Image: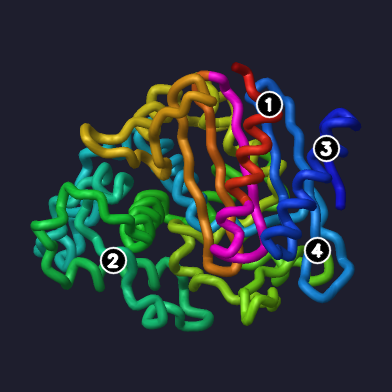
Amino acid sequence: MKEARGENEESEDLSTALESLRKKGNLPGLIAGHFTLQGETTLGAVGYRKAGSDDALQVDDPMHLGSCTKSMTATLFGMLIDEGRVSMDTTLGEVFQDDRKVTESSWSETSMRQLIQHTSGAMANPPWNDFATPDADVVDLRRDIMHWLVQRKRPSETVGKFTYSNLGYTVLGHVIEHLRGHSWEHEITSRLFEPLGMTSAGFGPPSKTKPDQSPWGHNRVFGFSVATEQDNPPALGPAGTVHASMADWIKYLRVHLTKDPQDLPIKGTTLEQLHRPSQGENYAGGWGCGEREWAGGRILTHNGSNTHWYCVVFLALEQQRGVLAASNIGLSAVQTCDEALQWMIRRHSQG
């Protein structure tokens, strides 16, 4: 096990607590931490990169972020807002005005706000296997996914109501691609990862990037953790394929704790748009929104899983701090990660 950036006593306490939780939850590996906008970071890692090995999970190992990618896609869209290219009320028909499949469909009036807040009426997922052709151009695949959507009647009974949709965020990613002229992967790398110094960030299972230096994802089979490199298809990228170390993820998360971003070309007022849900809703720009007593007010939260990994984060906006946890196994890690967050919150209580 390995810890980073904390006092010795606190690191020892964190290691002990995380190892106890990991064993109780029967997880291959577990990372958790607390951080502030001002630069304080405490992270701990316990367990193993791959079940059946003695290769210890390292605190700077990349972890799959799953649907926590969504706020990154929304942030990229926010940059387009600040450039005057679009607004939250821009419609699909306006973006793709030369695409008759879009403009002549019932989805033409779908707004970017609806895509970002999961109120467009889009279903959770398309048939992903139909858009997983090896070596196909990923931008073309996302265009095909959008066309698959617009060829279906828009369900009036769910428009304006929250329906969590990987499909909607994939279409949002294609909006970014269409307006920028580059793939979503290029855009998130050049406009988020590189400016923020997120050198560990990439796409898909970390073990495929550095097989001998990264953790594997796992399935739970008859009570045993079985290593796997399965993932969502690349076309789903804007909705959930990013991986990064926790320290690099924190570099991104701190952008959402500040009211005056310095490292990215996005205004604090635009971030606020991404942090405020519509009336009666509790989901904004890639964030679940609410209030918690321990946070002193407003929180942003999200979790992510491709069913072989799991991560979760809470940001306390008023206190400008956050807690996160991640494991290299899927939904079996939910309770353990929640308990790790509770431990971090108690340890760093400001009340």
| Location of the C terminus (image quadrant) | top right
Q: The residue tagged with tag 1: helix, strand or loop?
A: loop
| Residue 278 pos. (x, y %) | 24, 35
What residue is shown with label 1?
Answer: 348
Q: Is residue 57 visible?
A: yes
Q: Earlier in the sequence, mark 1 or mark 4?
A: 4
**Mark carried by residue 146:** 2
| Residue 330 pos. (x, y %) | 58, 65
Q: Are marks 4 and 2 in contact (CB under 8 Å)?
A: no
Viewer-side residue, 140 vs 270:
270
Amino acid residing under circle 4: Tyr
Residue at 71%, 58% (x, y): give it.
24
Amino acid residing under circle 3: Asp
Q: Are marks 1 and 2 in contact (CB under 8 Å)?
A: no
Depicted 184 relative to depicted 224: above or below: above
Depicted 239 relative to depicted 37: above or below: below
Q: CA distance from mark 3 to mark 4?
A: 19 Å
**Mark carried by residue 13:** 3
Q: Farthest residue in the front direction?
A: 24
**Mark carried by residue 48:** 4
Depicted 296 relative to depicted 126: above or below: above
Q: CA distance from mark 1 to mark 3?
A: 13 Å
Viewer-side residue, 241 vs 33:
33
The range drawn in magenta is 319-336
Q: CA distance from mark 4 to mark 2?
A: 40 Å
In the rendered structure, does residue 332 fall within the stretch colored magenta? yes
Q: Nearer the viewer, mark 1 or mark 2?
A: 1
Tally of numbered tags? 4
| Residue 43 pos. (x, y %) | 76, 40
